[in-house]
Image (spheres, rainbow, N blue to C red):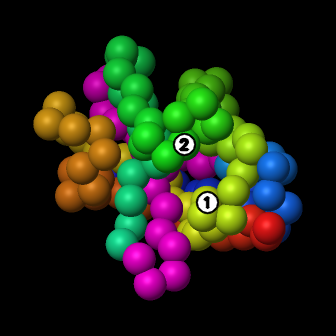
Amino acid sequence: QVQLVESGGGSVQAGGSLRLSCKTSGYIFNGNCLGWFRQAAGKEREGVAAIRFRMDGIYYADSVKGRFTISHESLSSTLYLQMNSLRPEDTGMYYCARALFCADGMDRIYRYGDWGEGTQVTVSS
């Protein structure tokens, strides 16, 4: 099992930027998926972006393509989500998560068994 701790959320105006961080501890296996998910009030949790650890494979939700960038820094064991051109509809609690296996879809929430507590992002118009 791994532990994941998110940070970097906050309140910004539309058009602004934020960078979320997710510090991981514990062993991440090659091929594991590391992903960012978000949940707006009254809505289901949805996949935002994901990568396969030390392997090819990257996923972005259509709603964030061209605006968000996911990356991982091995030296610090940190997963990042750079969010630019933020919109009010990006508001929500953002979570990072780890999936041991995700070959059937990097956005499949049921594959992710390890979750952080989340960090709140609020975008005002």
Residue 93 visible: yes
The outermost residue toward the bottom is 42
The Cα atoms of the two marked residues, 2 and 1, are separated by 9 Å
x, y percent for residue 6? 62, 57
The residue pinned by badge 2 equals: 64
Image point (80%, 57%), residue name: 14
Kind of residue at badge 1: Asp
What's the residue at 35%, 21% (across, down)? 57
Q: Secondary structure at mark 2?
A: loop
The answer to if 22 sits in the magenta stretch is: yes
- Please determine whether, in this image, residue 54 is positioned above or below residue 13: above
**Which of pointers 2 and 1 lies earlier in the amino acid sequence?**
2
35 falls in the magenta region: yes
Q: Residue furthest front?
A: 125
Q: Residue 82 sits in which quadrant?
A: top right
The magenta region covers 21-43
Residue 67 location, x and y as percent? 64, 37
Q: Residue at x 40, y 26 (%)?
A: 58
Q: Quadrant of the C terminus?
A: bottom right
Describe residue 3's horizontal placement relative to residue 119 as left or right. Answer: left
Of 97 and 46, which appears nearest the observer?
46
Would you say 99 lies left or right of 18 here? left
Q: Is residue 64 left or right of residue 43?
A: right
Residue drawn at (41%, 77%), measured in percent from left and top? 43
What residue sits right under mark 1 in the picture? 90
